[in-house]
Image (tube, rainbow, N blue to C red):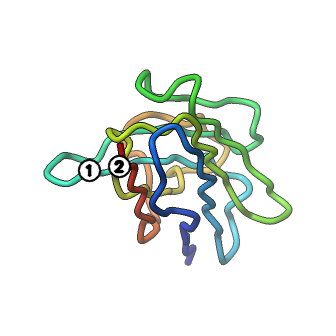
Amino acid sequence: QVQLVESGGGLVQAGGSLRLSCAASGRAFSNYAVGWFRQAPGKEREFVGAISWGGTTTLYADSVKGRFTISRDNAKITVYLQINSLKPEDTAVYYCARRKGSYVIPTTTSSDYEYWGQGTQVTVSS
């Protein structure tokens, strides 16, 4: 069983930065792509970004390109989401999830992921 725990969320002013962490427990994390998604109140969950198992490939939603950066430290079995230039529209609960299947490319589709964390709240004030 794999458990993912997100942390690092909080309340920040527009223009600020946060670094979210997704820490895994259990085995079989380093060989899997990891995705970040977010869900704002009253909206559907949406893709934010993803990183390949080796960290060499990253994907980002158009709305966050240039502001969000995903990285991973497989030794620490942790994936990070650096969020810069925060906007009020970035307010949401942020989730990480492990890609189904090892050594496969990351995707933007939530149904391709499993073992979701509980989420961490990011609130951006204007």
Q: Residue 11 in the image: state x and y as whole percent.
A: 45, 60
Q: Along the polypeptide, which appears first: circle 1 or circle 2?
A: 1
* Residue at the (34%, 47%) spot, across then down: 111
Q: Amino acid at mark 2?
A: Thr
Residue at image mark 2: 91
Residue 1 left/right relative to 37 = right
The quadrant of the image that shows the N terminus is bottom right
Q: Amino acid at mark 1?
A: Ala
Q: Are marks 1 and 2 in contact (CB under 8 Å)?
A: yes
* Residue at the (44%, 59%) spot, across then down: 114
* Residue at the (46%, 65%) spot, across then down: 115
Q: Nearer the viewer, residue 78 or 31?
A: 78
Residue 110 left/right relative to 96 = left
The Cα–Cα distance between marks 1 and 2, rounded to whole angstroms, is: 6 Å
Q: Nearer the viewer, mark 1 or mark 2?
A: 2
Give the number of the disc on residue 40: 1
Secondary structure at badge 1 equals loop
Above or below — where is 111 with respect to 96? above
Q: Residue 8 in the image: state x and y as whole percent.
A: 58, 64
Label 1 CA crowd tier, 10 Å (few <14, some 14–19, many 20+): some
Q: Residue 24 in the image: state x and y as whole percent.
A: 64, 70
Q: Nearer the viewer, residue 14 or 61?
A: 14
Query: Which image quadrant for residue 2?
Result: bottom right
Secondary structure at badge 2 equals loop
Q: Nearer the viewer, residue 110 or 41?
A: 41
